[in-house]
Structures are given as C-alpha cells and as structure tokens.
Amino acid sequence: MDQPHALVVASPGLGHLIPALELGNRLSSVLNIHVTILAITSGSSSLTETEMIHAAAARGTCEIMEVPSVDIDHLVEPDATVVTKIVTMMRAMKSAVRDAVKSMKQKPTVMIVDFFGTSLLSITDVGVTAKYVYIPSHAWFLALIVYLPVLDKVVEGEYVDIKEPMKIPGCKPVGPKELLDTMLDRSDQQYRECVQSGLEIPMSDGVLVNTWEELQGKTLAALREDMDLNRVMKVPVYPIGPIVRTNVLIEKPNCIFEWLDKQRENSVVYVCLGSGGTLSLEQTMELAWGLELSGQSFLWVLRRPVSYLGGNSKDDDQVSACLPEGFLDRTRGVGLVVTEWAPQVEILSHGSIGGFLSHCGWSSVLESLTKGVPIVAWPLYAEQWMNATLLTEEIGVAIRTSDLPSKKVIGREEVAYLVKKIVVEEDKEGRKIKAKAEEVRVSSERAWTHEPSNNKIMDQPHALLVASPGLGHLIPILELGNRLSSVLNIHVTILAVTSGSSSPTETEAIRAAAARTACEIRELPSVDIDNLVEPDATVATKIVVKMRAMKSRVRDAVESMKRKPTVMIVDFFGTGLMSVADDVGLTAKYVYDPSHAWFLAVMVYLPVLDTVVEGEYVDIKEPLKIPGCKPVGRKELMETMLDRSDQQYKECVRVGLEVPMSDGVLVNTWEELQGNTLAAFREDGELNRIMKVPVYPIGPIVRTSEHVEKLNSIFEWLDKQGERSVVYVCLGSGGTLTFEQTVELAWDLELSGQRFVWVLRRPASYLGVSSSDDDQVITSLPEGFLDRTCGVGLVVTQWAPQVEILSHRSIGGFLSHCGWSSVLESLTKGVPIVAWPLYAEQWMNATLLTEEIGVAVRTSELPSEKVIGREEVASLVRKIVAEEDEEGQKIRTKAEEVRVSSERAWSQGGSSYNSLFEWAKRCYLVS
C-alpha cells in the first residue's frame, strides 16, 4: 500500500486513450509505481476503444477504471465540433472524477490529465498533492497553446487573414499553413476552449511532453528560459518522449509481412493517413496514379474515401472500386493495398520500409522517427499542418506537399516526385533526409537510456535550499528556488526551518509558496536553544545558534528523502549546516548571499579585521580598508560590528570563516552593478587568500508581481497621478520610527509639496520602546495632516504590494530603509531612492547606492541615531522627484541605466544568466 500511486485521466476517444495507456505503462515499468488509468468513455464508445480498454486491463501493467461520461447535449450546440464536445464533457466530469478518486482504496498522490482535461486540475479535495498535464504532442504545440491567450489579446481579426507570420517564442513563425484547426475561426466555441486550456495548463505543477531534448532543444530551452514564455508558463516542462506504442505479437503468416519479407531493404513506401484520414474520391485516384507512376514498391492502407469533400460514401464494401481501373492488376507484385486495420508499429519496424507517406499525427510521426523512417508529409487536420512544418523545416526528416492536401487535390506527378525523393537512393536531398532520420532514431534511443536525456522524472537534478527562520530569510530562498527551478529545469526542495513561535504571516507565506511554486517545500520545526544563548541575545545570535543546533534534524530530513539532492544551498545564518552535506554524501554545498557583493566582501574579510584591528570599530579614526569596496567608516558598519564583545559579533566572524569552506557563493547582484567588487573576488590577492571559492553573481532575483485587485484603493489613487510624480515611502516590515521622527517625516512630506504614498508603521514611543496602541497609528501624525494633504498624499496603514507599487508609472522615487530586497525591487523598476537606513547592513547599502552606484541621495545623519528634520527630508524628496533639480536628473538617469542593465543581466546570454549556468554546470545540475 506504500507504493507511490499516480492517476492518469484519459479523455474519451481512442486517440486520447492510447497515449494515456502508453504513458501509464512507461510510468509503471520505469518508475515501479502503481498507476490507475481513469478512462472516460462515451455512450457511443467504439468497439475498438472497448477492446483496447479490456486488453490493457488484461495486461495488468496499470489498473483501468472506466467512468461513463455524462450527457452534455444541453451544454453544446448540435453542430459543435468534436474538440468542443470533449472539452465540455471533461469539464462536466468533475464530480464523477472526484467520486471515482474518493472511492479508491489506495489514494493517488499525483494526477495527470491530458490537454482536453485541464479543467480537472481545479479538483482540490481528493488528497492529490501534485497535478500535471501530459501533452502527447510536441514542444511547439505546447508553446503555441500556452502562448495562445497572449495572441488572443494582441492579434486583431482572424489568424487566417494575417499577412505576417505570428512569432511564438521558441518556434518558427506561425503562418496560415501552420495554424491549428481550432484557430481557424475565433468565433467558434472550440477556439475559446483552446484559449481556456492555454490558461489552465500553467496552473498545473508541470507539463510532461512527448518529445526529447535532442529533437526539440531550442523550443524546450525557450520554455525554460524565454522571458515572454516564462511570464505565462512558470511551471517546469519535462520532455519524456519518445513514448510510442510497443510492438504487439503478430502471427507471422499475416499477408502483409509475407509480402514485406519479399521486398528489398528500404525499398517500400508505407502509405497510411491515420484512422481518421479519409480523402476525396478524386484525391484517392490521384494518389493511386502517383504511386503507380513513381515505380516504387508501396504498402497502402486504404480508407473508405469520401464521395465529395465532406460527404461520406455509403459503400463500405467497395473501397477498391475508388481506385483507377486496372490499378491492382498493373501494380501486382509492386504494391499491396490493405483495407483492414494494419499493425503500424510493426510495419514501420520492418527492414523493407524506406519511407512513410503520413498525415503527420504526432503518434505516427514518433512511430516513424523511432524507426529511422523518413516521411512524406501529407497533413489533413488538427495540428498536423504545424507538425509538417516542424518535420520539414526544423528537424529535417521529411518533405511535404506544395499545398495543403486538405484544401487542394495533390496531383499524381507531385506524389510520384515526393515518393521517389524519399525512397530512391540516388536523390541527393533524399539521402540527406534519410541520414537525418537515422540520426533522430539514434537520439530517440539515447533519450531513454539511463544516461541523458529523458528519464528525467526521477533522474532530474535535485537541489536542496535551507531557509533560516523568519520571513526575511524565507522569501529570498523561495525566490532563489523559483529561479533555479524555472531556468535550470531542476527539482528544488526548500527546507523551511520554523521557530515554535512562527508568525501567522510566516506560516501563511510557506503555505502560499507551496501552492504557487514548482519547488517542493518542507517545514522543519526548530529545536529549543534557550540553554545555548543569553536571555537578552539578539535575534541574529538566536538564528545562527538555532541553525547550528539543527544539524541532526536537517541530516534526518535529507536522509528521509526518496530523491536525494546532490547540492545543498544555505544562507548566511545556516553556514553551520554545511557539514551535513558531507555527512549525507552530497556532491556540493553553496552559500546564497541575498545581499550584495560589498556585504559578502566585508563578511569574508571580517576574520582578518578581527585579528588586526584593536579596540571597537566604532572608535576607529581611519575608515577600514576592505578589498573591492570603498573604505568602511563609522556610517557603513554593520550592526553586528558595533560591539565586539557581543555574541552576535563572534557569530558573524565565525560565519566569515565558514563561507570560504563552501564550494562557492551565489550573490544577488550582477556584473554591471558591482563590477569592481566582483573583480576583486576574482583577482585581488588579499581576498583570494581567504576566499578561494568562486563567486557567482546571479541577480537581480526579486519578488515577482502578484495579482493585485485593481479596485485596491492604492492603485485607484495612483492611476490619477502624473507620471513619475509620486514618492513612495516605506521602511520595511520591521522599520519603525520614533513618535518624534514620524511627526517630522509627516511635516517634511507636506513641506516638499510632492505627491506621496506612505506605508505607515506603528511608531515607537521612544527610541527602542514600542507603542502599545496598535489601533492608533494615524494619531501619530500632526493634527490636520490628512486633511491638508488630501488629494496630494495617501497614507496606508496595512500591508501594501510593494513590487506592484514600484512598477506603477506614477512612482518617481522611493524613500526606503535600504534593505537589499527593497533596493533591488526599486532598481529593477528604474526608481531612484532616498536612503533612510535603520539597522543591519542598511547603512552600508546606503553608501553603496549613493557613492558607488549613484542612484540615491541620503540623509546627513543616520536616522537610527538622530531625528532627521523636516527641511532636510523635504529637500531630499524634491531632489529625487522634481524635474528641475540637476543632481536629481543625473540620479534619475543613472537609475534608468541600472534598470536596463538589470534586464540585460537576465536576458539569454546576459552576465547573470551565464553565471547561473556556469555554476549549474560546475555542480552537475545541467550538462
């Protein structure tokens, strides 16, 4: 009963059942897991479909459950397409599927649906922990479907009327010849259902797609790395193909194989247009003449033609009557016409087959490519037109008709020409196509070996990230995890160490992250450390000591994982855990610095300063010289350096000693922002002596925008303001001011005459003493302030969506405490800063922003030590926001330059993009 259990839901129809069965067989045999196939059957299920279900059940690889479909006649129009009916039926099956899952003795933990069943992803109360979509087609198809909602918004009119092909990230431009059937009429319900599926797929936990890296590397890379695609498709894509039907035992006397055995190697063209591929009578005639004219041996699985385009013939027994008179006699010995079902996989496996004239259904394509058989592309419907373009122009294993066979009769001369090009040895282009088909066959076999590339569900690289207690440490780790998962397409587990007194906000953040991220999140309750620290120990001391005391729990957590990580990443508070990586046999251990390169340089150089500097750092007369940084004076000291007798300082020195014991450091900055300091890590002799491991600048990694209700009063107010006219004031979740400073800040905002949004925290009554009156935040403001600034300013006393606010066009400046996360959120939006540092390393950050980067102005004194007067702040605000100020213009220009460089850093081939992949290759997360 403990065997993992996956549920695969198959939409009605043989074309959807077979891929689900093959996927289930592969999951069961390769992963050794229990698989249940939930086969949705319609009242009109074909005899073949019923036989297929019974045969699969008899094989015993997967458990098969049939669920009869519900009546949907009242939900669709009488002339609705098959696609519309299937999608509507699957949506109507929610309660039936829910009941079926609840009735299972062994509950599945994973549910996999197909493209038609994406609406079932919203089922939430059956105990399934992860939901995936299986695309039995290729990566182009997936990219187009998830990008279709974007096209739906930006393209006007019908797609068939577009003059320029549409650009889809990761694909060749899509013109009218590549459009899906469902895209031909935007007013049709099947098109709307297709758009809806495109919206629902990214709501899954990931997508399995029936292709492989060597076949579609560019498109798969785009699904991982392209920024346009990543905006709509944030979940990982797993290329697990080729998954094709396996050979079935066939009686050898079968007339087909008796005939094939008599033919020469690679001399026969196999002609089959799928179970639904019927031609007009005229086209059937031309195809017959073309095969005869080619002079090549052929095996033709002939379907009953339609008498006219769109009209079925009534004479099922006279299929051969649609052939030219005397055709069967003239081609006897050269060709074989079959009017019954034919075992396609076995035929394509036969040594005599040299080409395949195919409708280009993806299952047929894979059955051909995995046997090294080149294709004559004859697309008829659905996504087959796109498939034909993929096979001819991208992969190079096919030739295609000059026109779409579904729209124009293809003449006999063209048919003969195409067949000879594929089969005849002398044709140069044909030889090139055949060679490519053989390359693809080899790569398809390699994809499912134990080496790369496609048995990745279990072999996918796995990184473990450990987050220290506290929201301020959890969020950076979550964002790093999301970046690693989405860009590198690796499995990420986040071990979130929680304190016994975890705040509701922290708990909610963990739950929310688990719901929206592709990362696996595990909570790990912390141990009691009261006997290890003094009662008045600082928060920093408690966290470092707590993380060091967590070694055995972290070790146990890692050893309990079924999929062992190969890499562990800790933050600065967790460097004491790095020995766990060695204990459990991980290949590499890294430190993540969510701050900047100056901070990292100071930290690793601190043990040197601790040895050579006498007395307290606050008493030094000359600034401290740190390689790669501006000299560090009194105003740049980190809070932990103010008292060398305090335990938090000793812990800080210890961390500085432990960081170089890692295999490297990831830092949340980028080359263009801090090139001098990053160069010092590589080249400075002093730094190199103590920091021998590489530093990887992979920033900016910032929180992504989340959906915010547009009716939110903040955005209603911002929408009314002029562009870059508003200063945003927020001092972080822990940034409280004294009552006196709060009053002064209010006066200076009013005095500045500039528009503002102020996220006001409950002030402290005195320096360091919190007010006990949570409900009277507004009373700390000067009398009449709100009335006088009504329309000019907005005071917010609740949580505010900072990333979205900084993204708003009206924001022209940010009065900030200079926490590095807030700094990056501002810089990546091109918003200059009024630096108001309060604690931790924020004083250093303020100097970096003003003196090194040049995107900020700062107060003359430290706001944590002296009340900043109203006139000074008013001057700083005007300098940043007012257009006339020359220094302000220079700062605004620099802020815009930094914004551009931040985007460039994470574009493909950018400095941070390259740095991340350099790191990933070093620790074998990517090849």
Image (tube, rainbow, N blue to C red):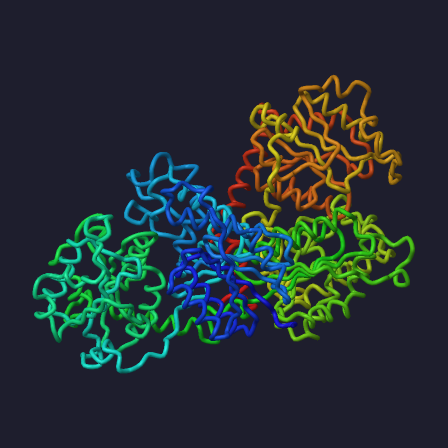
Please state the horizontal and vertical placement of residue 458, each as a whole percent of the image.
55, 69
Please say if 399 is above or below 371.
above
How many numbered marks appear? 0
Residue 259 at what x, y percent from top left? 20, 78
Q: Give the camera-side residue of 216 and 86.
A: 86
Q: Quadrant of residue 262?
A: bottom left
Q: In this view, does 397 lie above or below 538?
A: below
Res 914 seen here: no
At 39% from the left edge and 73% from the top edge, which residue is drawn? 246
Residue 523 on image: x %, y % = 72, 59
Q: Is there any visible trace of residue 510 in the rendered image?
A: yes
Q: Which residue is nearer to you in this view: 469 or 339?
A: 339
Point out residue 587 in the picture as x, y percentages from the top left corner: 61, 72
| Quadrant of image for the N terminus | bottom right
Q: Quadrant of residue 291?
A: bottom left
Where residue 804 sits, quadrant-wise, is top right
Task: Name the residue at 37% across, 46% down.
Answer: 81
Left/right of residue 632 with respect to residue 394 in the rendered view: right
555 sits left or right of 337 in the view: right
Left/right placement of residue 834 relative to residue 254 reads right
Q: In this view, does 591 lie to the left or right of 92?
A: right
